[in-house]
Image: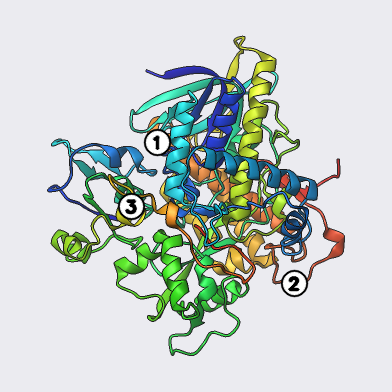
Amino acid sequence: MIELISTQQCIACDKCILVCPTNVFDRGADGLPVISRQSDCQTCFQCEANCPADALFVAPHTHPLPEASFAHDEEHLRRTGLLGSYRRDIGWGRGRTPAAARAVGPALSPSGPPLIS
Amino acid sequence: MTLELTTDVLVVGGGPAATWAALKAAEEGAAVVLADKGYCGTSGATASVGTGVWYVPPEPDAREAAMASREALGGYLADRRWMARVLDETYERVNELADAKYPFPVGPDGTSLRNGLQGPEYMRRQRIRVRRAGVTILDHSPVTELLTSFDGAVAGAAGHQRQADRPFRVRAGAVVLATGGCAFLSKAFGCNVNTGDGALFAAEAGAELSGMEFSNSYGIAPEHTSVTKTAFYNYATFYRADGSVLEGAGSQRGRSVIARTLLSEKVFCKLDLADEAAQKAMRLAQPNFFLTFDRLGVNPFTDPFAVTLLAEGTVRGTGGIRIVDDGCATTVPGLYAAGDAATRELICGGFTGGGSHNAAWAISSGSWSGRAAARFARSIGRGARRVQAAGGAGLRPAGRSSDVDIAEAVRTVQAEVLPYDKNYLRHGDVLRDALGVLDGVWESLRSVESAGIASVPARQAAAMVAHARWMYTSALVRNESRGMAKRLDHPELDPSQHHRITSGGLDRVWARPEVAA
């Protein structure tokens, strides 16, 4: 689920509010997004993929994590490279090549083509 | 203030089938509105998951092998003519994506590989293409009901924009339902927008369903997580807690062994059959598959991790709205169905594995329905028609209205359709008991009056309970095991039941063998 919005990195572009398919965010009084309906989060990582500032972190768990969890430790997420890692992995963002272009996976059968998705 | 729009074609949904429908309707010269519950470009299973595509070059041997490959698995309910036209249409449309600069990778031999699509990349590009085609996109605009004209034809839809918090109504010459399947809010990857809304709307307008017994699909995911991408579990060995191998368990064959075991104990997994080269390539093919593991700090190739099975209902199951012609028309004039919302039996029969057929179906049925809807809209013209709202349960009470806890109703439905020992490992006695509970939920939702934003969850609840009742009623009519519709009390395939099962109805649900046309 969405667990973290970095107020330090957020540029208040509203993108996450717009793209979230299950409408989890609202715009807060200060213009930054707030997680209003976390229980509606379907853990699809789309907000993170679409955040141009790498300001969001979606934990892989489909239930909320306690306050002390790694998912709320912004410094840890930055240090370990997890913050913004999905966007990097799919090659989105200025100067990057869409990862689709190099998505040549293994072939699951001897005669089959390589898996590309 | 209600947002009022008039258009030729209204497309409901925002995933692949919806975007292809919108594109092809616009190419036919129609004015098109696309209304999505979420955000067109991120909504639905494909945008998050990505998908293989049934992309087969037009070489007779390759096409023959492709068509033959899953006929037996599907219980011989697929139709060769439909398979052939889906292969043709998909081949053309995927090449169209390449022309539109989708960055297909290049294989070791220098050829462009086109047998799959990365979800986020595919759908962000589809959104751009739809916008460029002049389609009006309404995001965060869940449709809650269809509008019908005096003669019974579908003439638009209404709903409530949840971010703008205002009602909207779109009058249209034709409507394409591309709302996806129904995964019952199981949190399977990207599937929580898929609550079967389109099937409810269709049934309220008088349309029929088909193949609803093929609705017990479950995807593997690491326990307590969402990523139900299953291809790489081909490299898996499944274990019990004590480290012994769980015999018979597997991703493609043996998923039911996992389900049965999960009823009483945890099941663990390691992708220990992947060699180093495969491991490296897997990351390139499916970066989203590794999101979960990287964030959990688990090395899936060496560390055993607990797994679960999440219901994917008719998202991966093949049942859906029955279509009656090559343009994906339903039995109701002006109403078309595409993608997972429509039955996929025509090309899959009673079984579907990975996404490749599903993606091909979304592309093909989306394109056909968009074109056909545009032609239908043109044929009836733009004249004003008197319309009435068709929505019932969860919206307009049948008699006296009463307060119903919608969240509780959803939990009750989930308790009948998510457990492995009810929906996956089906037994007639269990299905009959479940139907009794589900009928009760339907009855209570018939007394609900809702408006505004509250109508959205109420209608989703109604759609899910309707879906569940068609599923189990159909499953009880198929007294055999065929495709994914296996029955513990009828474990064998019965050649005399080689037919599709049509279903429908709301207050009175029915299912019966399809009468050959």
Q: Amino acid at mark 2?
A: Pro
Q: Tell me the SS state at disc 1.
A: helix
At horizontal 42% and vertical 62% (from top left) the residue drawn is: B284
Chain containing mark 2: B
Q: Residue furthest front?
A: B110
Same chain for labels 3 and 1? Say yes or no: no
Say whether residue A35 is visible: yes
Q: Identify residue for label 3.
A: A39
Chain containing mark 3: A
Quarter of the image where the N terminus of chain B is located: top left
Say whether residue B222 is visible: no
Separation (CA) of disc 3 from disc 2: 39 Å
Q: Taking B506 as reference, is A58 above or below it? A: below
Quarter of the image where the C terminus of chain B is located: top right
Q: Amino acid at mark 3?
A: Ser
Q: Identify residue for label 2.
A: B491
Comes first in the chain, label 2 or label 1: 1
Q: Residue furthest top?
A: B383
Chain containing mark 1: B
Q: Amino acid at mark 1?
A: Ala
Q: Tell me the SS state at disc 2.
A: loop
Q: Taking B310 as reference, is B502 above or below it? A: above
For the rendered model, the colour scheme is rainbow
Separation (CA) of disc 2 from disc 1: 43 Å
Q: Are the two marked residues, 3 and 2, in contact with CB atoms closer than 8 angstroms?
A: no
Separation (CA) of disc 3 from disc 1: 17 Å
Residue B470 vs residue A39: left or right? right
Residue B333 % position (x, y): 70, 26
